[in-house]
Structure formats: structure tokens, C-alpha cells
Image (spheres, helix red, strand yellow):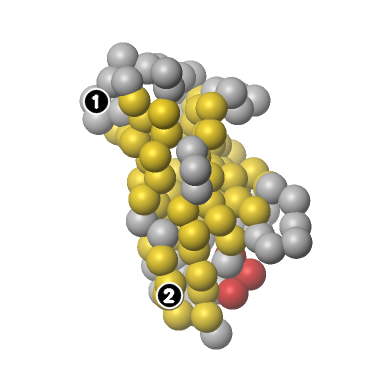
Amino acid sequence: QVQLVESGGGSVQAGGSLRLSCTASPSTFRSFCWGWFRQAPGKEREEVAVIASDGATRYAHSVKGRFTISKDNAKNMVYLQMNSLSPDDTAMYYCAADCPPNYWGQGTKVTVSS
């Protein structure tokens, strides 16, 4: 059974940074596409960033230039480096495998205070 586990969320002041990590198991699981999504209170889940097997990336307009998605194939992990955070980035962040997603993590909460 495929399992995705996110970590790295927390509370930070505006302008700060966080790095989210997503670990996939079993270690033999492979996906050609990984993504980070987020859902803020009262809003729909939205795509934040996607990375394909060839390393191509796609970002939501609202995070472009501030967030960076990356992956470590050897460790079966995906990361989201988030810089210059603003209160608008406050949300539950989810890791997903496959495009469109077939597998989801439980989420990690990010809270940005002004």
C-alpha cells in the first residue's frame, strides 16, 4: 500500500521560510509526477507545484519565484522550499503522487503570521 507522509510544517512569521518534505513508501514505489497542493480554511484545494520525472516543474502563479519543488529519487522524497512566506500561504499542505494525483498524504499545516 502506497503511503505518503509530509513533514516540515509549522508556524512562521511573514517573510520566513519553511521546507516541506514528503516521504513515499514502500521504497519501490515510483511516480513520474509529484505535486504539492494546499487547502486554506474555507477554500478549495489548489495545486502549488508539480515536478515531472524529467525535472520539469510547474508553479502556481501565486508562489512562482518564492517556492521551489525538488525531488530526491534515491531517497524517494519530494521537497517544497518555501521562502518569503506571507499570511496568504497559510494552509494545509499535501503531497501527491501521479498526475493527476492518485495518492495523497495526510497533510502538514503551515501557519504564517503577520
Instruction: Please tell me the numbered disc located at residue 14.
Output: none
Name the residue located 39 percent from the left edge and 39 percent from the top edge. Answer: 5
Circle 2 sits on which residue? 12
Relative to 103, say whether 37 is above or below. below
Q: Is there any visible trace of residue 23 in the rendered image?
A: yes
Dot 1: few (<14), some (14–19), or many (≥20) neighbours within 10 Å? few
Q: Residue furthest front?
A: 1
* Along the viewing direction, whichever of 108 and 100 lies nearer the viewer: 108
Front position among marks 2 and 1: 2
Residue 102 position (above or below residue 44):
above
Residue 57: percent from the left, percent from the top? Answer: 52, 36
Residue 27 appears in which quarter of the rendering? top left
Q: What residue is disc 1 on?
A: 74
Residue at 32% x, 20% y: name it: 26
* Callout 1 secondary element: loop
Q: Quadrant of the N terminus?
A: top left
Indicate left or right for 2 with 41 as reference.
left
Q: Amino acid at mark 1?
A: Ala
Question: Which quadrant of the view contains residue 83?
Answer: bottom left
The residue lying at 69 percent from left, 48 percent from top is 45
Q: Nearer the viewer, residue 86 or 24?
A: 24
The residue drawn where x is 59% and y is 74% is: 87
The quarter of the image holding the C terminus is: bottom right
Residue 58: x %, y % from top left: 58, 39
Q: Amino acid at mark 2?
A: Val
Q: Residues within 10 Å of mark 2 (few under 14, many from 20)?
A: some
Q: In the image, is 45 to the left or to the right of 82? A: right
Establish if 16 lies above or below 35: below
Query: Depth check: 110 or 34 in front?
Result: 110
From the viewer's perspective, tell me whether residue 15 is left or right of residue 59: left
Residue 79: x %, y % from top left: 38, 44
Which badge, 2 or 1, comes first in the chain's sequence?
2
